[in-house]
């Protein structure tokens, strides 16, 4: 039995029970953002949710499990939308594809800004800043690299995947901060996309790929970044 299964208790099948479970998670996410995870007890979550502490414990054995559930929910949303974008064949340039990928991640982070701030509080930015983010998206980024550059050295692509993940996520994590304006967010995404896209073009040229599945960087094919305002993304 997986380690997490012990703390997750039952996953209710009835709609009302599912709604209660989601209500607990939504309440916890709001409180974690407002007060921080360490300063939010399960008793406080129960009170704010208008439930008894016994009801909360029927669904979640402790606060740690609630944090894991919220993190998992966030990562699943990002992973799903990232996958859709990576396999979207409509993009006609590396820059456009990169913008699209950064946009969907930013949208999810902005929509969950308070929770994200709580999750990364006190974390040094020597990695992605949110546990499990890198391993969850590593394969998808590697697939993206293969689409852009074609088959290549596996170790080299692993290193490139690490760089793309950490560079891209560091940018969107800062761009999704509460104090960043929509215009600044848009500029950060566009600049990061141009840098990553230019790097991909150089790597493609170095590997002797005169043509990739993309028409090239920028030019008439480059699109504008869609402004993302906090609260625009509907769950």
Image: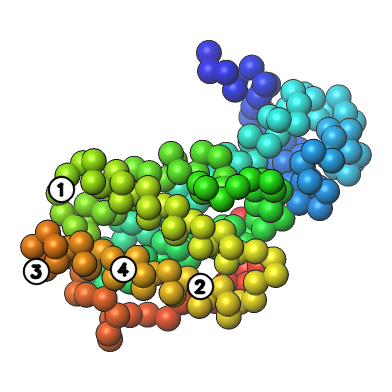
Find numbered disc 1 in the image and state the secondary structure of the residue it sits on: loop
Work out whether 150 lies above or below 154: below
For mark 4, what is the residue? Answer: 197
* Sooner in the amino-acid sequence: mark 2 or mark 3: 2
How far apart, in angstroms, are the residues tagged by discs 1 and 4?
18 Å
* Sooner in the amino-acid sequence: mark 1 or mark 4: 1
For mark 3, what is the residue? Answer: 210
For mark 1, what is the residue? Answer: 152
Report the side of 201 relative to 33 (left or right). left
Disc 1 crowd, CA 10 A, few/some/many (<14, 14-19, 20+): few
For mark 2, what is the residue? Answer: 188
Asked whether residue 128 appears in the rendered view, the answer is: yes
Report the side of 69 relative to 222 (left or right). right
Residue at (14% x, 66% y) in the render: 205
The C terminus sits in image quarter: bottom right
* Sooner in the amino-acid sequence: mark 4 or mark 2: 2
How far apart, in angstroms, are the residues tagged by discs 3 and 1?
15 Å
Query: Looking at the rendering, which quadrant does residue 67 occupy?
Result: top right
- 16 and 193: which is toward the camera: 193
Tag 2 and tag 3, C-beta contact below 8 Å: no
* Sooner in the amino-acid sequence: mark 3 or mark 1: 1
């Amino acid at each position: 039995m997986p380690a997490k299964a012990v703390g997750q208790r039952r996953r209710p099948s009835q709609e009302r029970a599912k709604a209660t479970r989601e209500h607990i998670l939504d309440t916890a996410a709001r409180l974690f953002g407002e007060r921080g995870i360490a300063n939010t007890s399960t008793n406080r979550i129960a009170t704010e949710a208008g439930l008894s502490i016994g009801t909360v414990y029927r669904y979640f054995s402790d606060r740690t499990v609630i944090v894991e559930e919220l993190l998992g929910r966030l990562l699943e949303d990002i992973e799903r939308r990232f996958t859709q974008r990576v396999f979207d064949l409509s993009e006609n340039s590396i820059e456009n594809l990169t913008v699209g990928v950064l946009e969907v991640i930013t949208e999810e982070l902005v929509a969950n800004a308070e929770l994200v701030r709580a999750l990364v509080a006190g974390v040094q930015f020597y990695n992605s800043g949110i546990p499990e983010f890198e391993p969850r998206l590593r394969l998808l980024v590697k697939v993206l690299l293969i689409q852009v550059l074609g088959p290549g050295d596996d170790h080299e692509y692993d290193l490139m995947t690490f760089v793309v993940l950490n560079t891209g996520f560091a940018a969107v994590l800062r761009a999704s901060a509460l104090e960043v304006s929509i215009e600044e967010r848009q500029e950060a995404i566009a600049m990061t996309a141009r840098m990553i896209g230019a790097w991909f073009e150089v790597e493609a040229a170095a590997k002797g790929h005169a043509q990739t599945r993309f028409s090239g960087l920028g030019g008439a094919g480059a699109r504008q970044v869609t402004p993302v305002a906090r609260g625009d993304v509907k769950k």
